Structures are given as structure tokens and as C-alpha cells.
Amino acid sequence: MNSTILSIKNLEKTYPNGVRALKGVSFDVKKGEFLVVIGLSGSGKSTLLRCLNRLHDPTGGEVLFENKDIAKIQGHEVRDIRKQMGMIFQHFNLIPRHTVLSNVMMGRLGYTSTLASLFGKFDPKAKEEALRYLDLVGIGSKAHIRADQLSGGQQQRVAIARALAQNPKVLLADEPVASLDPATCHTVMDYLRKVNQELGITIICNLHFLSLVRQYATRVIALKDGELVYEGDPKEINEEWFETIYGAGAKEVHVN
């Protein structure tokens, strides 16, 4: 884990309405680490992830991905970067009427012609790989049922498998357990850790709960009002740091 896969330098994002969501944020991400980003709602966590894979265009600064600045690239280069950075969202974003396997295959759209994907004509090898990823996240037996027949936690695991079908080098997870109950939170986080450890995929994950952060993160950064206010070991976030990040009077919420 000694080589840097991402290097963020003075990253800025100002929205058209004048809101400065990121104010000169800088940090490195090591290959193979499980980096967690924490902070209050509105601190810039989601904007940060979306700037990394260019769902949002940064206003300033650099995003060096394997030593190439991707902050200002355009067109097909952006599509190529998105293939290498899988994204998992809070609300799963599955197609409810499609089967689980069909949803996972959507992760291959960047590698398949539009016509072929419309008719569900995917490479058999890619389909085999998709089934392997479903097995990895513990729902291989659900491959041929409709996505809307699954529980929320199972749907999020389908979303993880779909992101893996892209063969990404980095997995960006934006509040992946925010809409799940506490027990399911741990199940989903366990599978993300499995992906990180068994496949060696670098993970950058936004989380709210410090108890989860301490359990799963190898390193943590904290944002407050668009600025980086903490970087280091999650176990070193004491009461003083907690107040710095979340404000005086804030209470830590535990997910057991």
C-alpha cells in the first residue's frame, strides 16, 4: 500500500449559485486502502466524490489519477475515467423491473455498443464475471429474480456487483448505508471490506457514523464547510476532534 493512486491538490468547486462546496482540498489516496470521508451534511463529501469521477466538473485544482490530471479532461477521456471509478449511491439506482443479473450487466455499458446492450447481448465472459461478483456479495442465488423483489440491503449489494462489473481500480461509495437499518449496515460494509481486501480495489467511502468509520476505515479524512479539517487514523478521533468536525454540542451516534 505504498503507491499513490489518487492525488487531490487544492480542489475547488463553486456551484453556479455561488456556493463554494470545496475550498482548496488536498490529500492523497494510497492504492488498496479503505479511505472514509466524514463530515456533516453539506460539508462537501458528495461533491468531492463526484468531482473525482467527473460527475461534477471541478472549478479549480488538480485530480491526479495514476499521475494524470483528470480535472480538466473532456469527452471520451471522461468516459474512460468513469469506467475505472465505479460508483455506489445511497439509493441503489437499480432498474426495478429488470433481473438482478441484468442490473449488474449495466456496469458493462461502457464496454458494449448501445445496440448490443439494448438487446441484452453481452459477452458471455462478462456475464460469467457478473455472476462471480454476485457470488462475492452473497446473492448469486438471486441472479434471475427482479431487483424490486429484494430487500434494501440486497439491492445495495447488487449495486456493488454492478460497480465491480466495470472492473474499476477505485470504488466510490456515497453514503452507501445511509438508508439501511443498523444490522444491514454492517452486512453491506462487510462486503465492501471483502471487495477491498480480496480484490485489492481502493475504496473511498462517505459515512456518517463514527462507529462504522472506526471499524472499517484504514484511514479517514474529515471535511467541514468544504475544507479538510482532519486526516489520519480513525481511532484517533477523540471528543475534541469530534467537536471540531461536527461542532460543539454534537452527539456521536453509534450503529452497533
Image (cartoon, rainbow, N blue to C red):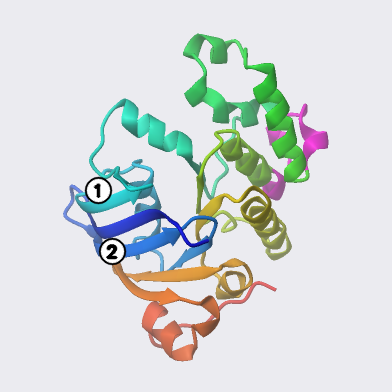
Q: Nearest the camera: 17 or 219?
A: 219
For residue 57, side relative to residue 193 (left or right)? left
Q: What is the spatial separation of the Cα atoms under label 2 and label 1, in whole angstroms?
A: 11 Å
Q: Nearest the camera: 33 or 134?
A: 33
* Extreme-bottom residue of the structure: 240
Q: Amino acid at mark 1?
A: Pro
Residue picked out by circle 1: 58
Residue picked out by circle 2: 25
- Vertical comparison of 20 with 136: above or below: below
Residue 222 screen position, x and y as percent: 40, 71
Q: Dot 2: few (<14), some (14–19), or many (≥20) neighbours within 10 Å? A: many
Q: Nearest the camera: 251 or 87?
A: 87
Q: Which residues are magenta?
A: 139-154
Q: Secondary structure at mark 2?
A: strand
> Which residue is found at the position 19% from the left and 49% from the top?
59
Residue 146 shown in magenta: yes
Residue 171 shown in magenta: no
Residue 149 has which mark? none
Quadrant of the image occupied by residue 187: bottom right
For the image shown, how many numbered marks are present on the structure?
A: 2
> Which residue is found at the position 45% from the left and 76% from the top?
232
Residue 212 screen position, x and y as percent: 61, 69
- Vertical comparison of 104 with 11: above or below: above
